[in-house]
Image (cartoon, grey):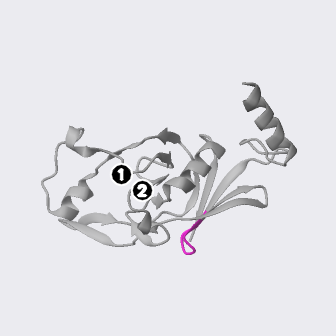
Amino acid sequence: MRRQTVGILFGLLLGASPAWGQEGDPITLLVSVSERELSVRRGDDVLHRFPVGVGTGARLSRGGGDGWRFSTPTGAFEIGRKKKDPVWYAPDWFYVERGLPIPPPYSDERYRDGVLGDYALYLSDEIAIHGTQDESSVGRASSHGCLRMRNADIAVVFPLVQVGTRVDIVP
């Protein structure tokens, strides 16, 4: 316990600040889809910059005229949930894309460990900032809309944010 306390105090002396911000400025995230970059900010200060994989913009038809567009949404969001060791729920498009039969909702077949890396920050039921099994996909238009990060990078971001942290995604 003493070592941890000394480490925290030493970090504060070196200018490190708590995750909730310093002098009232909250931590926020800014994502540029065109630059494929996520920055961690406190007020006007950029604390970290990381590459991200973004949506491909591709369209997948389901038949009957409907389907999916795999673009990263833009706008103002908040982190709604944080999860260590997240489990991915494979949506219908996963099966349609592969020409496989679609299992019933909540089938065990839909739940897949490890696909989202070590951490996930959920912005909605369908969009998250998460790690990946394929780190070569980071920095490219490679996802179905989510923001992919290298596992080591999301491990830096995860403890800095909390539920309610603002996330701005710009084109």
- Number of disc labels: 2
- Measuring 40% from the left and 69% from the top, which residue is drawn there? 142
In contact (CB < 8 Å): disc 2 and disc 1: yes
Residue that badge 2 annotates = 132
Specify which label sits upstream in the sequence, 2 or 1. 1
Give the structural element (helix, strand or loop) at label 1.
Answer: loop
Q: Give the residue type at disc 2.
A: Thr
* Rendered location of residue 95, percent (x, y): 20, 57
Q: Work out whether residue 3 can be spotted.
A: yes
Magenta-drawn segment = 31-37
33 in relation to 107, above or below: below
The quadrant the N terminus occupies is: top right
Residue at the spot of label 1:
115
Residue 128 as seen in the image, left or right of residue 67 = right
Instruction: Please tell me which residue lies in front, 72 or 147.
Output: 147
Left or right placement of residue 33 versus residue 46 in this view: left
Can residue 71 be seen in this snapshot? Answer: no
Residue 30, how many percent across, how many down?
64, 61
- Residue type indicated by callout 1: Val
